[in-house]
Image (tube, helix red, strand yellow):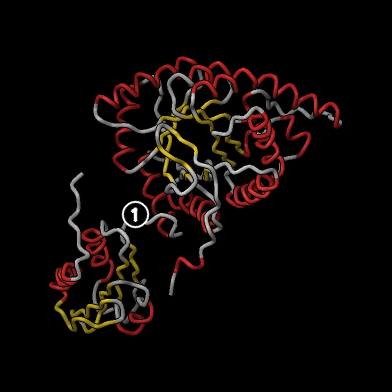
């Protein structure tokens, strides 16, 4: 069975260059995270960025609420480069346009939140007719024009990132607290930037509820397609929480859209050290077959038929073989379900009798009743004999 045949084709987008890294087009779906240090504490921030880069992040976003925070990105970049580390830096801007202008000097990409930049949210109910609302759009355009000219000259990229929780009073009064409101908040900015011929934009719609996030992104894609926009999409479930709950919400929201062909860069937002977000990002990409970066493991949940202690054996196999990018390895406790469940695997480690293991190459039985204490090494030898073993690189 071709497991990739069931995937919807990835949506075709333009490529947006962020510090020399492509987002969109045929580039890999990028993994990113965000620091949770005070950006002005450059030593702590650099240390956290280094840890995130080592864990596999490809871009990193930093809080830049003021021009002073934006300036700190220059020192942070110098410190990283001194250690031979280059990673694109994204400035996270919300309320102060002055911070956005300053960030153009130091960041590779600027994130703007339409709900916070030129509007407010104090839960006022505003009354608009079509004419008065059109005046509001004119006001937004007029205020954005100086920044549009500046970003065009800078050669930097933008992310237009709308959060469900930060819709402005203007949007809430006009469209309500809806997915349509999220899309319109974003489209207002996209239409203005496109009108003025700036298109190096990545778009993001996030919500803490994965169902709202999914619905909003589907509607966004439909709306952009109708208006001839092909901007790459950043996916994430914001304020997802921590632990199992945060990972479950993120997997549902991000994974669903990836399977539908939507998404060019992702972040798993956890109330944890940002380093811990990155493995979950790669896990979602691997599970949806959108980006294969490690071994795919299939293992049964175990039952009374299991002929060896499957959990520790599975962990040993994952530890020793997890670097074999693209291979699928099945670990099965007994022969009852082993052959059927491992049918798509490249190699199988299957319980054949108590304390003994049978090894398979696809559906072919290669070795029967190998003593359990020798079986992992024998599986590795089998992979080596097929010329598919690579040595793990030291970090």
Height in image: 239 above or below 323? Answer: above
* Quadrant location of the N terminus in the rendered image: bottom left
Q: Is residue 362 left or right of residue 289?
A: left
Indicate the position of residue 32 as horizontal and vertical percent values. 42, 40
Q: Quadrant of residue 87?
A: top left
Q: Is residue 30 left or right of residue 231?
A: left
Q: Is residue 80 left or right of residue 367?
A: right
Q: Residue at x 71, y 44 (%)?
A: 180
Residue in front for this viewpoint, 177 or 133:
133
Q: How many marks?
A: 1
* Quadrant location of the C terminus in the rendered image: top left
Q: Quadrant of residue 332?
A: bottom left
Q: Is residue 51 left or right of residue 377?
A: right
Q: Residue at x 40, y 54 (%)?
A: 291
Give the residue pinned by disc 1: 293
Height in image: 11 above or below 332? Answer: above
Indicate the position of residue 67 as horizontal and vertical percent values. 49, 15
Label 1 residue SS: loop
Q: Residue at x 28, y 31 (%)?
A: 85
Q: Residues within 10 Å of mark 1 (few under 14, many from 20)?
A: some
**Residue reaching furthest to the front:** 197
């Amino acid at each position: 069975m071709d497991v990739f045949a069931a995937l919807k084709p990835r949506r075709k987008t333009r490529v947006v260059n962020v510090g020399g890294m492509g987002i969109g087009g045929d580039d890999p779906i990028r993994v990113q995270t965000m620091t949770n240090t005070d950006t002005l504490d450059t030593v702590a921030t650099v240390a956290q960025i280094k840890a995130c880069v080592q864990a596999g992040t490809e871009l990193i976003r930093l809080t830049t609420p003021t021009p002073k925070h934006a300036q700190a990105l220059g020192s942070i970049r110098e410190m990283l480069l001194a250690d031979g580390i280059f990673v694109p830096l994204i400035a996270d801007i919300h309320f102060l346009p002055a911070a956005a202008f300053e960030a153009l000097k130091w960041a590779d990409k600027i994130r703007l939140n339409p709900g916070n930049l030129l509007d407010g949210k104090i839960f006022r109910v505003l009354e608009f007719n079509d004419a008065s609302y059109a005046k509001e759009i004119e006001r937004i355009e007029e205020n954005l024009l100086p920044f549009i000219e500046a970003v065009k000259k800078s050669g930097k990229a933008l992310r237009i990132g709308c959060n469900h929780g930060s819709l402005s009073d203007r949007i809430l009064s006009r469209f309500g607290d809806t997915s349509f409101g999220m899309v319109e908040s974003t489209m207002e900015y996209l239409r203005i930037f496109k009108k003025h011929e700036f298109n190096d934009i990545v778009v993001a719609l996030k919500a803490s509820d994965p169902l709202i996030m999914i619905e909003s992104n589907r509607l966004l894609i439909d709306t952009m397609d109708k208006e001839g926009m092909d901007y790459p999409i950043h996916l994430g479930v914001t304020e997802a929480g921590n632990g199992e709950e945060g990972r479950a919400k993120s997997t549902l929201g991000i994974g669903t859209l990836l399977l539908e062909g939507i998404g060019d860069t992702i972040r798993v937002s956890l109330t944890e050290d940002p380093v811990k977000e990155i493995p979950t990002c790669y896990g979602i990409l691997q599970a949806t077959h959108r980006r294969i970066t490690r071994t795919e493991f299939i293992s049964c949940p175990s039952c009374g038929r299991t002929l060896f202690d499957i959990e520790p054996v599975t962990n040993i196999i994952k530890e020793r073989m997890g670097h074999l990018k693209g291979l699928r390895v099945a670990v099965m406790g007994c022969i009852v379900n082993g052959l059927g469940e491992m049918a798509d695997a490249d190699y199988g480690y299957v319980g054949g009798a108590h304390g003994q293991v049978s090894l398979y190459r696809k559906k072919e039985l290669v070795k029967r009743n190998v003593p359990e204490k020798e079986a992992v090494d024998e599986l590795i030898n089998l992979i080596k004999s097929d010329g598919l073993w690579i040595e793990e690189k030291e970090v």
